[in-house]
Amino acid sequence: SIPLAGKAGRYLPASATWLPTRGAEVLVGRSRLSETSFDPQFRTLFREFAEANQIPLVPVFQQDLGSYVAYEELCRFRAVIIVAQDLGLHKFTEHYAMAMPIWVPARSWAYRLQMLIPWGMVSYSGNWRGKDVTKERDLPPRGQ
């Protein structure tokens, strides 16, 4: 049993438990990033990275599967890659509740994606000072 906080993922059917029957297929979770110019580049990057490193994974993009995919089908993938466009998405807790392996971008990559996204809770709207995650070092306070 996976510990869950609050109501996160508790609405999933009991049959929606990770059972990787789709071999090397990795689900790339639905994202509004697919509506941007980033989508074709991400698909190419993923494919070329896998080929160059001889990684036997086949990406399956959730938006290519149709508008609705049952939880029982989602939990059949080897893992899920979540490139979140919004911090309030349920998909992380849903896949966590299904006990699926979850891959998310590194902090520095997630920061760069935030700069690209013009909507949602992660949209950037000001001068951010503090931890420079692109260089993994602390920035001095303003005015110093």
Image (cartoon, rainbow, N blue to C red):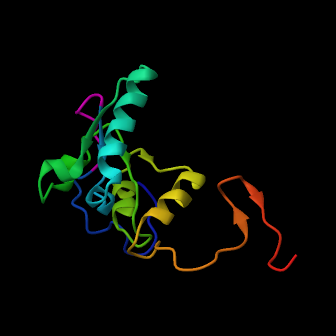
Query: Compared with residue 41, is residue 123 higher up or lower down, i.e. above or below?
Result: below
x and y, in percent, of residue 53 in the image: 46, 22
Question: With 16 as the anchor, is 124 left or right in this view?
Answer: right
Which quadrant of the view contains residue 138? bottom right
Residue visible at 28% across and 49% down in the picture: 17
Quadrant occupied by the N terminus: bottom left
Q: Is residue 20 magenta?
A: yes
x and y, in percent, of residue 118 in the image: 40, 72
x and y, in percent, of residue 125 in the image: 52, 79
Residue visible at 70% across and 73% down in the picture: 129
Residue interval drawn in magenta = 17-24
Front residue of 118/28: it is 118
Query: Compared with residue 54, is residue 43 higher up or lower down, i.e. above or below?
Result: below
x and y, in percent, of residue 23 in the image: 26, 28
Front residue of 17/140: it is 140
Residue visible at 54% across and 52% down in the picture: 109
Q: How many marks?
A: 0
Which quadrant of the view contains residue 33? bottom left
The residue lying furthest to the right in this view is 144
Quadrant occupied by the C terminus: bottom right
Residue visible at 40% across and 61% down in the picture: 84
Which quadrant of the view contains residue 79? top left
Query: Compared with residue 56, is residue 135 higher up or lower down, i.e. above or below?
Result: below
The residue lying furthest to the top in this view is 54
Which secondary structure class fits the magenta region best?
Answer: loop
